[in-house]
Amino acid sequence: GAIAAQLAAQRKPAVLILESTPANVASMAYRYAAPPILVKNPFRTDQVLPTLTDTPILLFHGLNDTIIPPSNAQRLHTVAPNAVLVLYRADHNHFPGPNHEADYWQQIKTVLTRAGLIRGG
């Protein structure tokens, strides 16, 4: 997701769908006992999303994600309030989980339909 956001900053997409995406990779370095200066690219998704004002954005994240905490999704939603934020009771490696799979695909279909990329139905 962080890489897709960086690409979106260079080439605006029709839709941006991010799943379990860090808001700022450099700030996450502290979680792993590394100084942020060691991060070659900080992947500032939190700085990219506000520039995509006309791009539909769908944010997915697991409430039980211990690798990239859900506070990252909340931060991204704060800087891009028009984005749709969908949180599931799932962790990072088992996302979206069997209880949410149908809704997950419906959310994707909805954003693609609204953007005119697929027909509804």
Image (tube, rainbow, N blue to C red):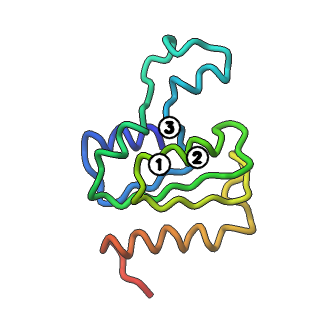
Please tell me which of labels 2 and 1 falls first in the chain.
2
Residue 23 is tagged as: 3
Spatial CA span between label 3 and label 2: 10 Å
State the SS at label 2.
Answer: loop
State the SS at label 3.
Answer: loop
Name the residue located 70 percent from the left edge and 44 percent from the top edge.
65
Near-viewer residue (81 or 87):
81
Spatial CA span between label 3 and label 1: 11 Å
Left or right of 13 on screen, residue 31: right
Image x and y of residue 32, in percent: 67, 20
What amino acid is labelled 1 in the image? Answer: Thr
Image x and y of residue 68, in percent: 63, 38
Please tell me which of labels 3 and 1 falls first in the chain.
3
What amino acid is labelled 2 in the image? Answer: Ser
Question: Dot 1, crowdedness within 10 Å: few (<14), some or many (≥20)?
Answer: some
Near-viewer residue (83 or 43):
83
State the SS at label 1.
Answer: helix
Does residue 101 lie above or below 90 as drawn?
below
Question: Residue 117 lies in what quarter of the image?
Answer: bottom left
Does residue 116 lie above or below 76 as drawn?
below
Name the residue located 62 percent from the left edge and 14 percent from the top edge.
34
Residue for badge 1: 78
Left or right of 21 on screen, residue 80: left
Residue for badge 2: 20
Name the residue located 52 percent from the left edge and 43 percent from the top edge.
75
- The residue mark sitting in front, 2 or 1, is 1
- The residue mark sitting in front, 3 or 2, is 3
- The residue mark sitting in front, 3 or 1, is 1
Name the residue located 56 percent from the left edge and 55 percent from the top edge.
60
